[in-house]
Image (cartoon, rainbow, N blue to C red):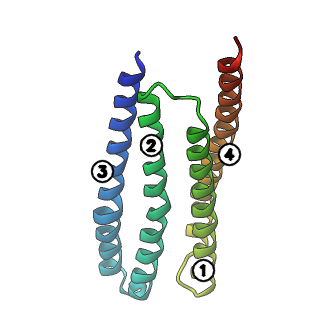
Amino acid sequence: MSQKNLSKWLKGIIAGMAVCGAIIYLYLIPVWGRDLVEANPEFSNCYIPWLAVLLISAIPCYWGLYFGWKIAAEIGKDNSFSRENASYLKNISMLAALDSVYFFGANLVLMLLGMNHPGIFLLSLFVVFAGIAVTVVAAALSHLVKKAADMKEENELTI
């Protein structure tokens, strides 16, 4: 598979992820939340805070997709192992960590305010764990890409 072809596939996947995320965040979550409130009116005070928490958590996700798009563009230019890509991966790692900490903290605050069920809090720990896994993988890839970029620069200087 050529670099340009790989880049197109990656961009297609990133665009698909953005569309799926928009459907989930802008349609499914509000509809499911309204259905839950209609079925259980005692949760009506929790709808807006939870909706805000979830929509805010989408911001780092989409910012990470932006950096992923930039990485795909660099791959298309046959510049896979570059300091720019290492930096983009580091940014993705930081965004995933920030989102995980935010989501955990928001869940904890909502639980202390009585707007969260302990079972939901425990289930949300799986989401936090997934975010931490993305953090670690992106950080490791950033480190490896930076090392490969350093070796590439050394080889370019060798006669």
Residue 74 percent location from the top left of the image: 46, 34
**Which tag, 4 or 2, sits closer to the chain's start?**
2
Query: Disc 4 marks which residue?
Result: 136
**149 vs 89: above or below:** above
**105 vs 76: above or below:** below
Front: mark 2 or 3: 2
The amino acid beneath tag 1 is Met
Residue 118 percent location from the top left of the image: 61, 73
**Which tag, 4 or 3, sits closer to the chain's start?**
3
* Mark 3 neighbour class, 10 Å CA radius: few under 14, some 14 to 19, many 20 or more: few
What residue appears at the point 64 percent right and 41 percent down from the top-left corner?
Answer: 137
Q: Quadrant of residue 50?
A: bottom left
Question: Is 124 left or right of 11, judged from the image as shown?
Answer: right
**Which tag, 4 or 1, sits closer to the chain's start?**
1
Give me the C-alpha separation between circle 4 and circle 2: 20 Å
| Front in this rendered view, residue 30 or 40 | 30
**Which tag, 2 or 3, sits closer to the chain's start?**
3
